[in-house]
Image: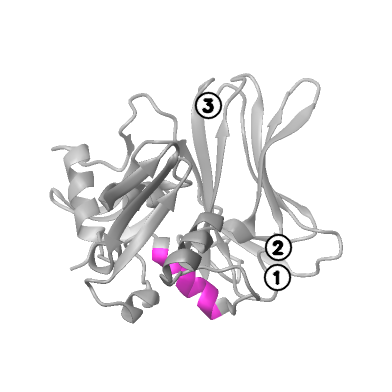
Amino acid sequence: MQLAMVLSYWTGLPMTAYSLARTSVTETIEQLGVMNAPWYERPIAAHYRPEDEFLLITDATPANDEEKRYLELAHPLASNGSISLASITAEVLFRDRTEELFTKLEALAGDSISNDWICSKKGATILHYPLDDPNSEHRYAGSGAYSGLKRNVNTLATVPAFTLQEGERYIASYWTYTPGALRSHALTCVAQREPTTGQEDWITCSDMRFARIVNGDWSLVELPFTVDRAEDEYRIFVEGRRTYQDTIWVDELIIRPDAATSFRVLEHDGERITKVIYNGHFLTRPR
């Protein structure tokens, strides 16, 4: 952010982010669309011509799959130490890549398509908690979702001991319903718990507001964590301040290996995959 401001100041180039007064909800959602996953609607694309160029400045490893994707698609311009500069056109940045993804997944699935989880990392453990409460007012997928008062400790799942692989890095992801004042103001963590003593450490913590992937009224929260001890339990939870009165809705919790392609075929027509769960995303192939 600071590097982008300095570059904009000295060159006069416009920015798609800024540090001024708070933006409106609709503007913020549009801004998030710049780096959103390339299979969701991104209304901000309408403001740009296909040949318009974006400059990408980075001084760290990509924060998520989407940042990595767009950096790989960008054209390198310059680098100095850990800082690099690249460019990408609006046509490349905003291109829908759903069909491209399904073609890739078909190649990974091979000749025998099943309903089992498939992962590019052999022997990987993938856990899926649908959280299908049929009484929930809102749902992202399936027959329902988890709902609870935000002020409470909302445990979404507890992974039993000896389920995850020691030393492996995972991502716990889930979709959360966002409409409503301060709806996403809540702490969300992965806690590591020693089953015998009950000693618990919060090893990864974030805030539901920091979700970077948006699809309509829902956002994808991602919590990366490393399994330090296979004999411990791992609990994923959401908790807000005691004064909060509103409800949260959470759906489709998935724990998968980091830096890997993990997917499950939900529907297919012969060897043609038509619907999948891919790295936490529920996607339908365009007709």
What percent of the width, then of the height, locates residue 149? 75, 62
Above or below, 107 against 137 in this view is above
Q: Quadrant of the N terminus?
A: bottom right
Color encoding of the figure: one colour
Picture layout, residue 3 above or below residue 122: below
Overall secondary structure of the magenta section: helix
**CA–CA distance in space, label 2 to label 3:** 29 Å
Residue bearing mark 3: 164
**Which amino acid lies under the numbered mark 2 shown in the image of this protein?**
His
Q: Mark 2 and mark 1 in contact? Answer it, CB < 8 Å.
A: yes
Instruction: Find residue 182 and name its label.
Output: 1
Give the residue drawn at x 20%, y 58%: 99
Q: Which of 50 and 237 is in front in this view?
A: 50
Q: Does the magenta stretch include residue 31?
A: yes
Mark 3 vs mark 1: give the one in front: 1
Q: Residue 131 versus residue 57: which sits nearer the camera?
A: 57
Task: Report the number of numbered marks.
Answer: 3
Task: Using the numbered discs, state the Cα–Cα distance from disc 2 to disc 1 in whole angstroms.
Answer: 5 Å
Which residue range is magenta in the image? 26-34
Q: Name the residue under label 2.
A: 185
